[in-house]
Image: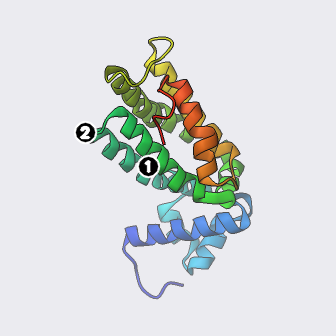
Amino acid sequence: MGLFRKEPEERKAEILQMAHKMFLERGFVKVSLQQIADELKITKGALFYHFKTKEEILVTLFRTGLTPLIKFFEKTQSSNDSAIQKLQNYIDYFLETMIPLGTEQYSFMRNTWDILSSECENFEKMTINPFHEKIIVQGIAENTIYLPTNDPKKYSIYLTRLFIMVWDTVIDVKPEEIRSDLMIPSIEQLLGIQKGTLK
């Protein structure tokens, strides 16, 4: 099969890249570990060294795909920007990176939801909601966010649901229409932000 031995991390990256391509093209259910190995011209044992199941590959792809978003959260949270500016940057990032993933990536996520649901729920709970809560708390302190009740944690979950709802329903809608018609009005109303503050 392979003519020379590759470094483990290089081989692992190749497996992930090939699996992702094949999952998108053929569907997760229709791809086997043997088919991935065949495409890479390696033995199934060599693939098995890195991943024991397709599900393990899928979860690794999901976690790897979250890295840019996690880095964005960290950079945003550590900045000296106001809460409104952080929220604005977040909306911009979401529209520029998440929405353009398109119908193919969206369908892939929906079709593997039974496997990824616990990963998604954990990421929301441990990463997205706390990020939202910190922005909300900062906005309250800066007198730019006004909640009907003093419960930033609850509203952080609402904000997460809003972003997921947008991603879940606006395939093939122009990002600028999403921004002006849905996201900005909804976020301003949810968080008691003065109308017209967000762009």
Whether residue 53 is visible to the viewer of this picture, yes or no, is no
Instruction: Please determine whether, in this image, residue 179 is positioned above or below residue 195.
Output: below
Residue 69 disc label: 1
Question: Which of the two labelled residues, at mark 2 and mark 1, occupies the earlier sequence position?
Answer: 1
Instruction: Please determine whether, in this image, residue 90 is positioned above or below residue 17.
Output: above
Q: The residue under label 2 is which amino acid type?
A: Asn
Q: State left or right for residue 77 relative to residue 30.
A: left
Q: Residue at x 38, y 43 (%)?
A: 73
Q: Residue at x 59, y 43 (%)?
A: 180
Q: State left or right for residue 101 relative to residue 72.
A: right
Q: Residue at x 57, y 45 (%)?
A: 179
Q: The residue under label 1 is which amino acid type?
A: Leu
Quarter in which the N terminus is drawn = bottom right
Instruction: Please determine whether, in this image, residue 123 is positioned above or below residue 138.
Output: below
Extreme residue in the top direction: 149
Residue highlighted by disc 2:
80
Residue 37, percent from left and from top: 59, 73
The quadrant holding residue 114 is top right
